[in-house]
Image: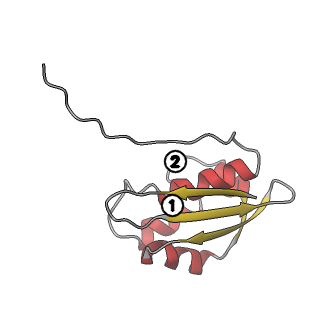
């Protein structure tokens, strides 16, 4: 099982994702979050996916992004969907497990 925690920033809706796969193709995903949009997405899409249909597509494609395009509020920078996909990707050996970060730096004036 692969687990990730996504801290999306100012909204405060920390999201926990667990992914498990026996064959590297079909993956079962559990998402725990306070975000109503993400909860609705998971309720609608279910918990079992083909990892290739999720991970091996162009940016903005696949079931999560297609759902979000139709139902999410306008907020393209939310990292939660990407975190779900990264968890699936690592669990199904389509990528190595490595933390990703977005870090805001303060301007340093001379």
Q: Residue at x 48, y 59 (%)?
A: 80
Q: Is residue 89 above or below residue 47?
A: above
Q: Residue at x 55, y 58 (%)?
A: 5
Is residue 17 in view?
A: yes
Q: Given contact means CB atoms under 8 Å apart, are the residues at marks 1 and 2 in contact? A: yes
Residue 27: horizontal and vertical position, in percent?
75, 63
- Name the residue nearer the viewer: 85 or 62: 85
Q: Is residue 98 above or below residue 89?
A: above
Q: Residue at x 37, y 53 (%)?
A: 77
Q: Determine whether the residue tagged by mark 2 lies in a helix, strand or loop.
A: loop
What residue is shown with label 1?
A: 65
Q: Residue at x 50, y 72 (%)?
A: 33
Q: Is residue 108 left or right of residue 43?
A: left
Residues packed near mark 2 inside 10 Å, few (<14), some (14 to 19) or many (20 plus): few
What residue is shown with label 2?
A: 59
Is residue 61 in view?
A: no
């Amino acid at each position: 099982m692969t687990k990730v925690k996504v801290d999306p920033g100012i909204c405060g809706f920390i999201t926990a994702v667990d992914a498990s796969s026996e064959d590297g193709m079909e993956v079962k995903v559990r998402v725990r979050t306070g975000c109503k949009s993400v909860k609705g997405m998971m309720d609608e899409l279910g918990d079992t996916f083909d990892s290739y249909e999720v991970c091996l597509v162009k940016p903005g494609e696949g079931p999560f992004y297609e759902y979000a395009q139709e139902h999410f509020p306008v907020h393209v920078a939310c990292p939660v969907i990407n975190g779900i996909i990264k968890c699936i990707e690592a669990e199904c050996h389509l990528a190595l497990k490595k933390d990703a970060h977005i870090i805001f730096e303060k301007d340093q004036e001379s």
